[in-house]
Amino acid sequence: MKKIAIVLALLISLYANNTIKVGSKVFPESRLLGEMISILIEQNTSLKVERNLWMGGTKICFEALNSGALDVYCEYTGTAWNVVLKKKNRASADVVYKTLKKQFADTYDLHWMPPLGFNNTYVIVVNKEWSINTVSELVTVQDKIKLALNHEFMHREDGFYAMCKFYGLDLPNVTTMEHSLAYKAISEKTVDCTSAFSTDGKLVKYNLKALRDDKNFFPPYFAAPLVYGKTLRKYPELEPLFNTLAGRLNDEKMTKLNYRVEIKKEDFYDVAYEFLKVEGLIKEDSVKKERESQMTKLTRQHLLLVGISTILAILIGVPLGIFIGKYRSFAPLVLGTTGVMQTIPSLAILAIMVPIFGIGVVPSIIALTLYALLPIIRNAYTGIISVDPELIEAARAMGMTNMQILTMLEIPLSTTIVMAGVRTATVICVGTATLAAFIGGGGLGEFILTGINLNDNYLILCGTIPAAALAIFVDFLLSRVEKWIEPQGLKIQRELSN
Amino acid sequence: MGCRGTYVSLEIGRINNERKIMITVKNLGKMYDDFVAVSDLNFTVERGETLCFIGTSGCGKTTTLKMLNRLIEPTSGEILLSGENILQQNVIDVRREMGYVMQRGGLFPHWTVKRNIALVPSLLGWPNAKIQQRVDELLDLVNLDPGEYRDRFPAQLSGGQRQRVGIARAFAADPPVILMDEPFSALDPVTRKQLQEKCIELKEKFEKTILFVTHDLEEAFLLADKIMIMDKGKMEQYDTPENIKNSPATEFVEKFLQSHE
Ligand SMILES: Nc1ncnc2c1ncn2[C@@H]1O[C@H](COP(=O)(O)OP(=O)(O)OP(=O)(O)O)[C@@H](O)[C@H]1O
Ligand SMILES: [Mg+2]
């Protein structure tokens, strides 16, 4: 009971009042912006911040914000225009922003703050040795310049072909290759030109020059904080605060910041903090907040996910297992259903949760609970049916009621095997919970997911090693509990029969 | 109907007073689908008497015994305990009125000897002090030193000791009737002998009505006031040991006695 109370308290504290939940997408720039917003709030208000950085793609972040699971994250105008409003037409940056601001407020009660100032759109970049400065000027070198473009840019509706048509270009020397390979090819001078995102930190690394989109072909992707309506009204201090960020960045500044976190691997917090201080957006004498290390935070989230899911699975699974042990005609149905659930890949179960329960902690817990159910139900069932029928007959003959037989005989005699099921389920949960990060549930999987996205083996190990260690530790701990919970008489019986 | 009911119970009341009848069984039968496990049993047992059921394997002894505490529900007939039809009473109350001893003890392995013996008293809600005292008294009665055995678990007892505890458990709440199903058949001859003597001692001391299933004719002659010989679910003869020995009622009984000499 005490344990359950603690878990509930933790859960409540997770969703406590006066906490602003800041999100970000799964790439460094978005995360850095999330970090800036977080620090800005922490340093200038009395509100607490919960960072749900590195959450997922546009759909996940938008859904989270729209359902109130997030209070704020930075969105890009072009993305919202395409993905959320599903608009295909071209429009100027100003029109796009105004349309978004109005439609989001009216339809979703989500509010666009003023843009931060940079435009992370597509750009055509060339080696700095080339003297051209605009896309139009490409026409002057179109026969000799060699381009390497990635597949997506080649085939997007607003990609390469459309651009050539729009600018009247005829570029014959084009090959397709992966983005990172294209950068490499440019640095080795085997090609001259590629497409990129305008604030990509790698532009600094590879010393590339962006050609100005002089005829405004590429859609505008201005970043701006997008905020949940209720939050804005509840904490009126927030809107003026977000306004202070307006226009503070430009493409060049953002590219340099991205370079620092992405290429130089500087700490996101430190980079964001320093930027805000230089811009005078946080007080000169402010100090960095005590930060829970990412490792502690994710481990805590991981344990919380596992703990809650397992407790739920026990609360559902043990009574259900006992029930089908008593009414065996239900056993094939229940064991069959949970068995099938077990054969569905865990990632698929998580994916199924998204359209039903959205993203975040709740669907992760539901998926993990379903996953942990089978070993618990199966063992509770086995425990109940393997109680010696002679003992049950003795109990009945002594005038015990069915309830007394259950609580005084069958359940105590099943504890060990039930506990073994709980142990299996928990260990499975510790492993499977690493996947929760894919649907914004947090936990150690975030390291793994970030690592995969950044192609960073160190980060992947930061997730996998603690998760494995946790599984071993939890297994050990529960094996101790298993021994401890075994009724003494049975322990003696087991030892004597050995 | 009302008149007849009254008449029957008056009659039973009268008989009860005269001969102290504890159990009356009328037309008792048990069918499994088409299979007749027990049919048409009629007998009475007096207070303080020991009745032994004996017969070929599968003849229905266990079935009969279990119908008496409704572990098996009869398909026909009546069972009266002190004149009351137990089939119309709360089954839990009926069972708490009867002790039950099984072949292999049936002790709860996760409970101490003390807790096993105290089972029915604690179900009946006796005060703790009384239960403690009763447990020690019963352990003494079955010749187990309470100080030594009270806190042991069943796994720490020999087969004979377990059976002693099983008997103590059956006697714990002082029920008027004790049912025993081959309680000594798994024991070595020496232990069996001791426990049979213990059984006689207890029965005489406490005037229990004991119904006892056995397949050991010698045991039946030793313990029983009445013996019921059964075959294929039917009663072949029901009488005192002497009468059975001296005048077997059927050819089956005669052969049965011969084959066990
Ligand atoms: N649940 C049941 N379904 C069908 N038949 C049964 C069932 N239980 C018992 N029987 C049959 O009823 C008959 C009487 O069984 P019972 O257990 O009373 O025999 P028994 O006299 O105690 O035999 P034993 O000396 O071997 O213990 C047997 O033929 C047995 O096969
Ligand atoms: Mg039998």
Image (cartoon, coloured by chain):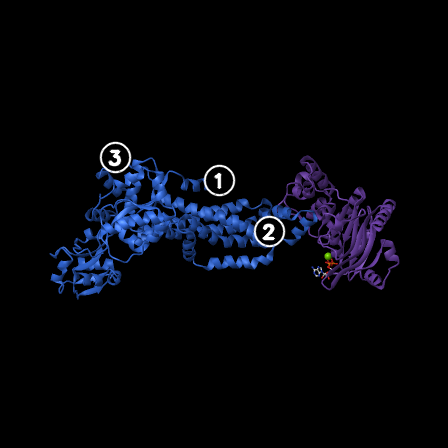
Chain colours: A blue, B purple
Q: Which mark is residue A271?
A: none
Q: Quadrant of residue A356?
A: bottom left
Left or right: A361 with respect to A164? Answer: right
Choose the circle earlier in sequence order: 2 or 3: 3
Residue A65: x, y in percent?
A: 36, 47
Q: Quadrant of residue A166?
A: bottom left
Residue B11: x, y in percent?
A: 86, 48
Choose the circle earlier in sequence order: 3 or 1: 1
In the picture of the structure, the residue carrying the numbered disc 1 is A5
Circle 2: element type:
helix
Check disc 2: other Cα within 10 Å, few if <14, some if 14-19, many if 20+: few
Task: Name the residue nearer the viewer: B47 or A198.
Answer: A198
Real-space Cα distance between discs 3 and 1?
40 Å
**Marks 2 and 3 belong to one chain:** yes
**For the residue marked with disc 2, what is the amino acid?**
Ser
Choose the circle earlier in sequence order: 1 or 2: 1
Q: Are marks 2 and 3 in contact (CB under 8 Å)?
A: no
Circle 1: element type:
helix
**For the residue marked with disc 3, what is the amino acid?**
Lys
In the picture of the structure, the residue carrying the numbered disc 3 is A283
